[in-house]
Amino acid sequence: MGILVKNISKSYGKVTALSNISLDVKPGELYGLIGPDGAGKTTLFRILTTLLIADKGQATVTGFDVLSDYKSIRNSVGYMPGRFSLYQDLTVEENLNFFATIFGTSIAENYDLIKDIYVQIEPFKNRRAGKLSGGMKQKLALSCALIHKPKVLFLDEPTTGVDPVSRKEFWEMLKRLQQKGITILVSTPYMDEAALCDRIALIQGGKILEIDIPKAIVGHFLKPLYNISASNMYSLITSLTHYEHTYSVFPFGEFVHYTDKREAMNVEEIKSYLVQQGLTNIHIELTQPTIEDTFMELAK
Amino acid sequence: MMKAQNVIEVDNLSKLFGDFVAVNQISFHVKAGEIFGFLGANGAGKTTAMKMLIGISSPSSGKATVAGFDVYKQAESIKKNIGYMSQKFALYDDLTVKENITFFGGIYGLSKKQIDQKRCELVEELGLQEVTNSLVASLPLGWKQKLAFSVSLLHEPKIVFLDEPTGGVDPITRRQFWELIYKAAHNGTTIFVTTHYMDEAEYCDRVSIMVNGKIDALDTPKKLKEQYKTDTMNDVFLKLARG
Amino acid sequence: MKRFVGSVRKEFYHIFRDRRSLFILFGMPIVQILLFGFAITNEINNVDIAILDQSNDVTSKEIINKIAASKHFSILDIIQQESSIESIFKKGKVKAVLQFENNFGRHLIKEKQATVQILTDATDPNMANTISNYISSILKNYQQELNNTVSIDYQIVPQSRMVYNAELKSVYMFVPGVMTVILMLVSAMMTSISITREKEQGTMEILLVSPLKPFQVIIGKVFPYIFLSVINAIVIVLLSIFIFNVPVKGSLFLLGFESILFIITSLALGILISTISSTQQTAMMISLMGLMLPTILLSGFIFPISSMPLPLQGISNIIPAKWFIIIVKGIMLKGVGIGFLLKETLILFAMTLVFMGISVKKYKIRLE
């Protein structure tokens, strides 16, 4: 009784936001929806939280149909929209209190669930939400989404614009919530966060590229991948872009990730090509593809 | 002359809001043509520091020059010599690509002829021929950001300040964006960039990391990783910012 | 019930933490009523005029003394020739010149008819009109006295008396109008803005994905404004009574009841506006253009409905403010009871039901 999405499509006028999306989230799973802005993640979230009606297809959340049983869904899910959607002019405590009362509960009643998160922002409980830093806003929004002990948690890009430290803490909190039996569907544009999910769906342009567990998803990257570095990054990229055998070349941290068109490629040959282009300190080695490499390959 | 090569020089710069020290005596310099990554946790004082450098906020104490101009007295000259692009505001959604280019060229005092020439180059380079007369709102986010970056370079500024330019952009476009940055740097433009993507920090020539208003680390990504004995900039950042 | 109290409390936080809405809520009513009461009044005081007395006899002198004695006018200048009239107007020193014809007194006694010309500076037509009315009424008064005392002529002089505003005090007429405008502004505009603000900030998304039923969301948001509007109504009535000495001849209780009815009508309109607009800006524009303008222009507040072209008279019937102004005038100035206001009250009531009905139908339980 997690989340079941079957052949969902949705368009806004001429723009197709989702085309024929299917996925299933098992109860208690931490499921990641990975894709850039405009991929259709928010639209899917809104359909599942009963805020939008799909043009085609069916979806259920904890067994309730998103159309006919929307009231039951609204009672049992927690939702954190992409934009910071709390009352900026209310204090931390007032926000939490308000959301507790509209769900017919109180902070004290479900304090256990939010305790971990709330203690971190409790020192600022009399501060207006609008004056909090990005990381703290996120924690407050999560507390508010959890205050009524939802069975399913929808988090739409909770870590966008948040620094790496807060992001790491946020994911640690999600892991702990998962252990308490809450099903979590989370979306993110950061590929490095994908590895923290139980299962991920890569999504772009309203289509699902691939669904798998994070470790297996890189298995969909079939070509051998090379790390190449040299003295001058810009010349390295332009040289490789113009190299006749290049299949793909992307800057990746301190290296360039390179794949070749040919089945069997010759490292020495590339090296001499690059030397010829006037590059020095050339270093080439085979490397493991990441989720991001896989995403780019599938999105091509 | 070593000094002439520094396009940004910051010496003990501070900014106070009441009792709160947002920026606490930071010092650094950025060389011409360098890609300088300016990192920090949310609320560490990055934005405040950047605002002082682009001449829209006056420092409380300390010294700073940008493109050779003093941030206290010559803010107007600074604004003429820098480009600025932020994630929040970049282009007018309700103007077409062409109108945006013309408008921004105009406010930097380019002649009509210069604007026309620049526009043709820019449209050609970004492959926007099909959409020059479309509203910017109708473009995908990645295109918008690339266009915004190119527009910020229209008046050939010495330095470009980029405030989280790639947030939410898909991985392929993000890399195309960085190729544009490399190219601009290659052509001598200094790049001053903030980002939350730590892999992007690795693309920078040098990186500074701000924690609680101070710069706690400043070096090349490689040396920082050696110094903190980690494999990625992400771990460097976590070690520093978590204290 | 707890949910309701929670929502209301939260709404009060919003209101009291936003200086702009606080000003609109409490500053505006006071500013408006004082503005209308003191500045934009049709009453005239100490208006400078000049006299050209070509007759210079006892009768004209008496009239001049009467005018000089009134607090409405002060005689700035006595001019001698007709030719000076233009120059004195051009200098802008006086608003009117009173010209007595030659042999004014003799004409009046012998021919029972004499002429005084009232020349007014019509650059301000309203003012000019008022001045000429005031002078005419002074002349009429004098003529009446004359008839009573010395006249052997039993000619009946028609007497015109203003029934409900005998002292010609325009502030009396403004109070009901201003009260209507303010209640409309606060109730309709403020609620529509506060609801659309939730849409704009994205908080409406969270409220929708909660067990709160739509009507609970709305009632929670609207209730504080009923309360605040009632306070406003009280402030306005108190200001009128104690600063402008406007009487409340009818029942205060009835006035309160009708005000609450009108507040609810306005709130229903505000909710309706919020269902069709997605941003605060749109809500504000619709409230101002669609509600405020008709309320000010077509309700009989400033321009009498009877002098409007027929199509506009028709339109004025669907403007709730028209009916409320009739009710308030009735209670405050005429002192009538509910019996005389039944029709207006029922119309307002029906309008409220219609607005509520449309709002409920239009209210979206989802986005889009």
Image: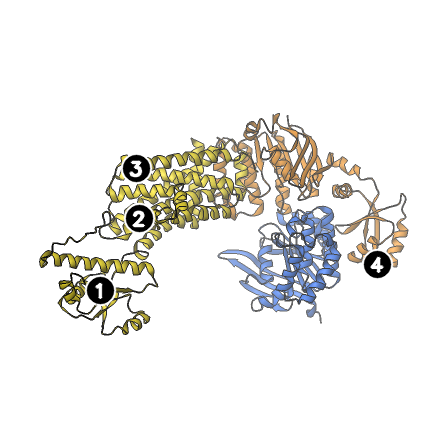
Mark 2 → mark 3, Cα distance in angstroms: 18 Å
Q: Chain of mark 1?
A: C
What color does chain C have in the rendering?
yellow
Q: CA distance from mark 1 to mark 2?
A: 36 Å
Near mark 4 (Cα within 10 A), the count class, few <14, some 14-19 or many ≥20, is some
Identify the disc placed on residue C175: 2
Q: Earlier in the sequence, mark 1 or mark 2?
A: 1
Q: In the image shown, does C342 or C5 lie closer to the viewer?
A: C342
Q: Residue at x 63, y 59 (%)?
A: B84
Category of crowding for the residue at label 2, using alpha-carbon neighbours closer than 10 angstroms: few (below 14), some (14–19), many (at least 20): many
**Marks 1, 2 in one chain:** yes
* Residue C85, numbered label: none
In the image, which is nearer the foreground, mark 1 or mark 2? 1
Q: Are callouts 2 and 4 both on one chain?
A: no
The residue sitting at 85% across, 60% down in the picture is A278
Reading the image, the residue beneath label 4 is: A279
Write down the quadrant of residue B37 in the picture. bottom right
- Which residue is label 1 attached to? C116
**Quick one: which chain is blue?**
B
For label 2, the SS is helix
Disc 4 and disc 1 in contact, CB within 8 angstroms: no
Q: Amino acid under label 4? A: Leu
Q: Amino acid at mark 3?
A: Leu
